[in-house]
Amino acid sequence: MSENKICDDKGVINMTESVCDTSQKGRIKHLVKEWRRKIGEINQKYSEPRLKMTPLVRFSLLALRIYLIVLVIILVYKFYTLVR
């Protein structure tokens, strides 16, 4: 038996057996709130690393971040010069 949804003016609430007839905007708003809540839970769970990193590993990860940022900047610059 599937659970139906009942609606209020703020969006969709899981409850009893009433059919939901809110606007699409209300559903999307509820969906975005739910995703933000789930992402917040995941970020809270993994806020601190579980592995200890040596200074060399930290430096290598920093170098990779800088390298990727430089590549993105070059890509954006190249796109801008081609479009212009």
Image (cartoon, rainbow, N blue to C red):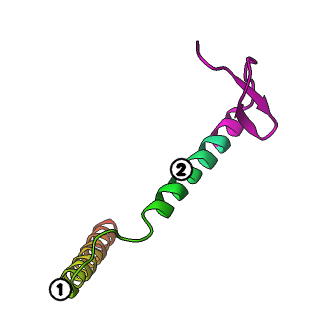
> 43 or 64: nearer the eye?
43
Which kind of residue does numbered mark 2 sit on? Lys
Residue 24 magenta-highlighted: yes
- Image quadrant assignment for residue 20: top right
- The circle on residue 56 is 1
* Tally of numbered discs: 2
Residue 52 is a magenta residue: no
Quick check: marks 1 and 2 in contact, CB under 8 Å? no
Q: Earlier in the sequence, mark 1 or mark 2?
A: 2
- Image quarter where the C terminus lies is bottom left
Please name the residue shown 72% across and 34% down the image: 13
Highlighted range, magenta: 1-28
- Residue at image position (67%, 44%) is 29
CA gap between label 1 and label 2 equals: 33 Å
* Camera-nearest residue between 40 and 29: 40
Identify the residue at image location x=75%, y=29%.
22
* Vertical comparison of 48 with 20: above or below: below
Residue at the spot of label 2: 38
* Frontmost residue, 36 versus 76: 36
- Give percent across and percent down for residue 72: 29, 71
Q: Position of residue 55 (x, y in %)?
A: 22, 87
Position of residue 80 in the picture relative to residue 29 (left or right):
left
Extreme right residue here?
9
Question: Residue 23, position in %: x, y?
Answer: 73, 32
Q: Is residue 51 found left or right of 25 in the rendered image?
A: left
- Residue under the point 59% across and 16% down: 2
Quarter of the N terminus within the rendering: top right
List x then y, in percent, for residue 28. 63, 40
How crowded pointer 2 is (Cα within 10 Å; few <14, some 14-19, many 20+) is rated as few
Q: Residues within 10 Å of mark 1 (few under 14, many from 20)?
A: few
